Image: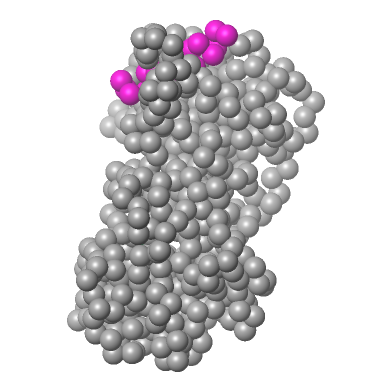
Amino acid sequence: MNTKYVFVTGGVASSLGKGIVAASLAKLLQARGLRVTIQKFDPYINVDPGTLNPYEHGECYVTDDGAETDLDLGHYERFLGVKMSKANNVTTGRIYYTVINKEREGAYLGKTVQIIPHITDEIKRRMLLLGKSGEYDVVVTEVGGTIGDMESQPFVEAIRQLQWEMPDEDLITIHLTLVPYLSAAKELKTKPTQHSVQMLQQAGIHPDIIVCRTEVELHDDIRRKVALFCNVKRGHVIQSIDASSIYQVPLNMEQEKLDELVLKHFGIDNLPKPDFSKLENYLEKLHNPKSEVDIALVGKYVELQDAYKSILESFIHAGAENCVKVNVHSIHSEHINEENVAEKLSAMHGILVAPGFGERGLEGKIAAIRFARENKIPFFGICLGMQMCIVEFARNVLGISDAASAEVVPSTANPVIALMEDQKSTTIKGGTMRLGAYKCELLKDSLAYKIYGKELISERHRHRYEFNSKYLELIEKAGMRATGKNPDTALVEVVEIPEHPFFIGVQFHPEYKSRPEEPQPIFVNFVKAAIDYKKNA
Ligand code: GLN
């Protein structure tokens, strides 16, 4: 069988859940036994989202192979359990970078380098790359942006050319739109969908399936109207109704027969029906919590939910695992200080200090850590959150008042967090952090070992600074332990305070690997500690 390609475009508005619909379809096909992967093409000029502020584009998701990618890749991994890689996220910047480098090498032999064919050829090459590996039966490609945007035109043109070049049964296009409900008129409106499909058709693409995002059920008349005016077959207009959990969407898409339509188009039949008992079990637990816990997420990008997407998802998974609802209270670290910290945090059953960069809000993070440490509230620090544990401990327990991270006070006499050796010569910002999966060895008598149940773990990273080992002895003598280290470089990955019921800081980002059916163990145990704390409070 030839590799099959699914292209998912979006229209009318952004944030309709294109990534979730694409991932849901991929999950449905995977659950029927096909080998499926999914990739995202983003229309911005940044070579990758690593240099983007989370306010711009939400969280930067990091893969095992160290790619800094769009947060939709997090959804893909969480839905499919398939590891994403550098090849799964391509931006306009990356495409141009490759083409311009080739031009400089003289590879175009004197030709004028143009959007068509050179840029579109490179886009097509990338679109087919994963499929060519022979590892997949189906490659789902989500095209970022909204149809009609100037930026995404070369991607759309590349799909048009592929549609023309490939056998019909090897490629299918799905267009996701919005059917708004006007509550005053009590009516669903199809015109935006019609216009969006018209625009897609002007670009030469005729969608095979239209998925309509809607907040109320789409009745038959509306479906028929969309089918008629958008010129697709009856039954090829399906709804994506607002769901209580994103993990409900694959089940909704199955009910709408999205997978059946796609398989029929590909000429694939006789595949077994998907077995979603594990996912259903997860949803059952998620929707029937026995109690609640309140956890503070202390960070500086809290205004934007997407900035901490993987952390929020990890709490949902860990909550379901513990049969509790985790109420995550996002608290801006800039609004916390020594004076108001008790008022802000004393009702919490757990405190998480988030990853981040730069100086803004750091003192608030330190105040939150001190409060958690002194009041024995379950605490979990991630990356910058772990680094600030060291600063807080050095300042308030060891009495080193000028202890700081060299990231914010490069001239400090006591850089308890210092720039990693191999970062010292780095001047370029893009793609140069310590990125991706590294091993970490845990001490057998540690909390971390209890949590993971094994000595050697692997987690993902994204940082430039590290625990300065010159201070290790001093810090350990005072009661904080380094319980996890990289076996090759001895870089400190995990710190704990054994005197505290649950205090753990990790240099890595465990949130990237949590999945609904495989919740991340630190999150699971942190939530469990919060439940215990609540019981005893
Ligand atoms: N800014 C810190 C560093 O570069 C922490 C990074 C993070 O939290 N991801 O080391």
Front residue (pair 349, 33): 33
Residue 159 on the magenta segment: yes
In percent of width and height, residue 501 lies at 50, 85
Front residue (pair 241, 509): 509
Q: Residue at x 37, y 13 (%)?
A: 113
Q: Residue at x 29, y 65 (%)?
A: 407
Question: Quarter holding the C terminus?
Answer: bottom left
| 112 w.r.t. 306: above or below | above
In percent of width and height, residue 139 lies at 61, 29
Q: Is residue 377 visible?
A: no
Residue 424 on the magenta segment: no
Q: Is residue 340 visible?
A: yes
Overall secondary structure of the magenta section: helix
Q: Which residues are magenta?
A: 149-165
Give left or right: position of 347 versus 236.
Answer: left
In percent of width and height, residue 31 lies at 70, 39
Q: Residue at x 33, y 90 (%)?
A: 398
User: To which quarter of the image does residue 83 belong?
Assistant: top right
Question: Quarter holding the N terminus?
Answer: top right
Q: Residue at x 38, y 23 (%)?
A: 104
Q: How is the image coloured?
A: one colour
In percent of width and height, residue 366 lies at 30, 75
